[in-house]
Image (spheres, helix red, strand yellow):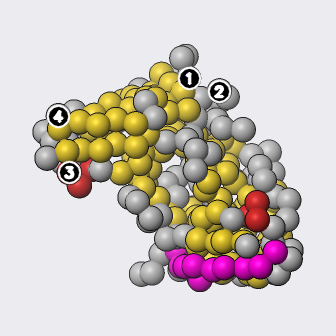
Amino acid sequence: SQQGEEDPQALSIQEGENATMNCSYKTSINNLQWYRQNSGRGLVHLILIRSNEREKHSGRLRVTLDTSKKSSSLLITASRAADTASYFCATDAQLTGGGNKLTFGTGTQLKVEL
Amino acid sequence: NAGVTQTPKFQVLKTGQSMTLQCAQDMNHEYMSWYRQDPGMGLRLIHYSVGAGITDQGEVPNGYNVSRSTTEDFPLRLLSAAPSQTSVYFCASSYRTSGGGGYTFGSGTRLTVV
């Protein structure tokens, strides 16, 4: 079953605009992570926000986390054509046997047009 | 520093054949996992390992076996390939920390079962 669900499924914007993607999840988490996947490639880790954090920045990325609503958002500011990719949220939960389990949502396809 | 290396990149199998997907990491990560990615389904966890000699099942383990004899290697075996196993397979690794951490993904193996 999917833990994270992204919204929207697809987003098309013009270069220079901001892109916002949302993620909702169902159970308690250690942290929430966002990944980017370019077409035909592997996933690249973008940013991690821990369950006791509310907001985090990394370059043009801003992530928020609301554990009471079990939701997160990823904001990409001043988007570029190179940001065109699929973006996935993933929730990280502790396993009883040790280690962590990362559960992915279905992703948001972002297209940035010139 | 190679990161996570997956081989082969592409493979076509006939129904009933067996094969092993290789995954190796050189970052001394304790945690390794296998995911499959299907259109509209996001990534689903097949098997994972929290250290050498320790493996466990994920969401969709049926038809797959794993072993972890060393920290570096985590091969995924398809016992008797079926068309439903046509997918893109990703191996990922991370440090086993109490707060979790970002995962490093391989570039994937695209498997077609005919």
Left or right: where does residue B88 sit relative to residue A94?
left
Spatial CA distance of label 2 from label 4 is 30 Å
Dot 4 falls on which chain? A
- Contact check, label 1 and label 4, Cβ < 8 Å: no
Left or right: where does residue B16 sit relative to residue A46?
right
Mark earlier in primary sequence (4, 3): 4
Q: Residue at (69%, 54%) from the top-left corner?
A: B45
Front one among B8 and B111: B111
- Contact check, label 1 and label 3, Cβ < 8 Å: no
Mark earlier in primary sequence (1, 4): 4
- Please state which amino acid type lies under the numbered disc 4: Glu
- Please state which amino acid type lies under the numbered disc 2: Lys
Read off the magenta span. Answer: B4-15
Mark earlier in primary sequence (2, 4): 4
Q: Position of residue A95 (x, y in %)?
A: 74, 46
Spatial CA distance of label 1 from label 2 is 7 Å
Above or below residue B61? Residue A33 is above
Spatial CA distance of label 3 from label 2 is 33 Å
Crowding at mark 1 (Cα within 10 Å: few <14, some 14-19, many 20+): some
- Please give the residue where the numbered disc 3 appears in the rendered image: A81
- Please state which amino acid type lies under the numbered disc 3: Ala
* Secondary structure character of the magenta stretch overall: strand
- Please give the residue where the numbered disc 1 appears in the rendered image: A70
Front one among A4 and B18: B18
Q: Residue at (76%, 65%) from the top-left corner?
A: B83
Mark earlier in primary sequence (1, 2): 2
Helix, strand or loop status at disc 3: helix
Confirm whether the magenta stretch covers residue A24: no
Q: Position of residue A114 (x, y in %)?
A: 14, 47
Q: Which mark is residue A17?
A: 4
Q: Residue at (58%, 44%) from the top-left corner?
A: B40
Q: Position of residue B53 (x, y in %)?
A: 81, 73
